Amino acid sequence: MNAGNEHTGGEDDVFKSRIRRLIVHSPKRWTPADVENALNAGRPGERRMLRRAVRALINEGTLQYTYRMGCSFLEPSVQGLVRISKGLVLTPPRFNYSLQPGEVVVSLAQGSAFGAGDHASTRLALVGIETALRTAFGWHHREKTRMLDIGTGNGVLMIAAVRLGMTFAVGIDTDPCARFEARENVRINGLEERIRVSEKPADAQCGPFSLVAANLRFPTLVSMAPTIQSLTEKGGGVILSGIREEEIQRLLDRYPSDVFSRLWVGCDQGWCGVLFMKRAQ
């Protein structure tokens, strides 16, 4: 890369993603020099781009500088946001964040139901939802759309789906603590009229749904595959996450290609997510 070249915003975003993954998901502390070395930013243009990306991550609240024993470190901000993609951001309640054009923000209270949304499987499920609602389906042509979130946890998936344009969502969970946290997050986001949290199991829900999401472990996803498929309307989507890389093919085999087309598969830190569309035949 020529040091005199002008770097694009897309290249900056790549550096931001690499820095975020390096620091947020690592148990060690990183100095700025450590980050440059780990990302092989040896040439002047690359170093400038990396430092610009670090500044952006600090300004948006993802990272913070800490000072210990005479050294400066880059660490995840305990009060900051979690950026899922260019257009989807998770923040704590009352977080002072300047919304950019095209962005969707979901506010989450700190709780015990699967963290703050920064686990790889949660991120993959959110990317799948955003892919479905922004690019893969013509949702804006439909008068009313419904989503089912199986194992909703803190409710982040269904809240994001409604924020991204889904008309109504139902989140189900067997854990009463998770249901409490999900309802609280629904309230924080002002979506009580569009989201319902239920203790009823999936096979007791009134389908079909335009979108069905499940961020669960592989054995549960396999056992629930017939129920998930029957609850998905023709032309609708299925988003699955919580799958290890060595399990993904076996899960894909549970969704026959003559009924479901595979639109997206993503992997992150050994976890995978997948987006299917149920054929409209």
Image (spheres, helix red, strand yellow):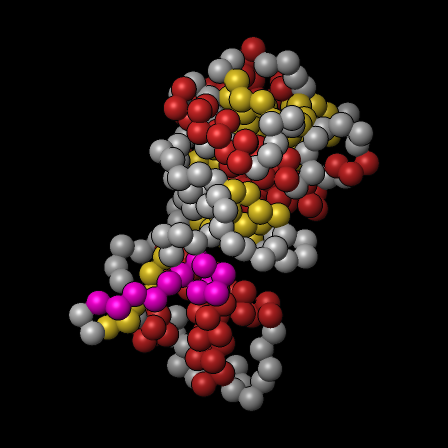
Query: Is 10 situated above or below 1?
Result: above
Residue nearest the observer in this picture, 85 or 281: 85
Q: Is residue 12 above or below residue 204?
A: below
Determine the image quadrant of residue 264: top right
Q: Is residue 45 magenta?
A: no
Task: Tally the numbered discs.
Answer: 0
Q: Is residue 174 left or right of residue 213?
A: left
Q: Residue drawn 52% across and 18% down?
A: 198
- Residues rendered magenta in the picture: 57-68
Residue 110, horizontal then vertical, whole percent: 40, 39
Q: In this rendering, does residue 158 appear at all?
A: yes
Residue name at image x 44 percent, y 38 percent = 109
Residue 172 location (% of width, % of height): 51, 21
Q: Residue at x 55, y 43 (%)?
A: 106
Q: Of all residues shown, which one is farthest toward the top?
A: 204
Could you tell me which residue is drawn at 35 percent across and 70 percent down? 35
| Residue extending farthest bottom | 4
Quarter assignment of residue 97:
bottom right
Task: Determine if the magenta segment contains residue 61.
Answer: yes
> On the picture, is 31 further left or further right than 245?
left
Work out which quarter of the rendered image holds the C terminus and state it: top right
Residue 152, x across and y down, in percent:
49, 28
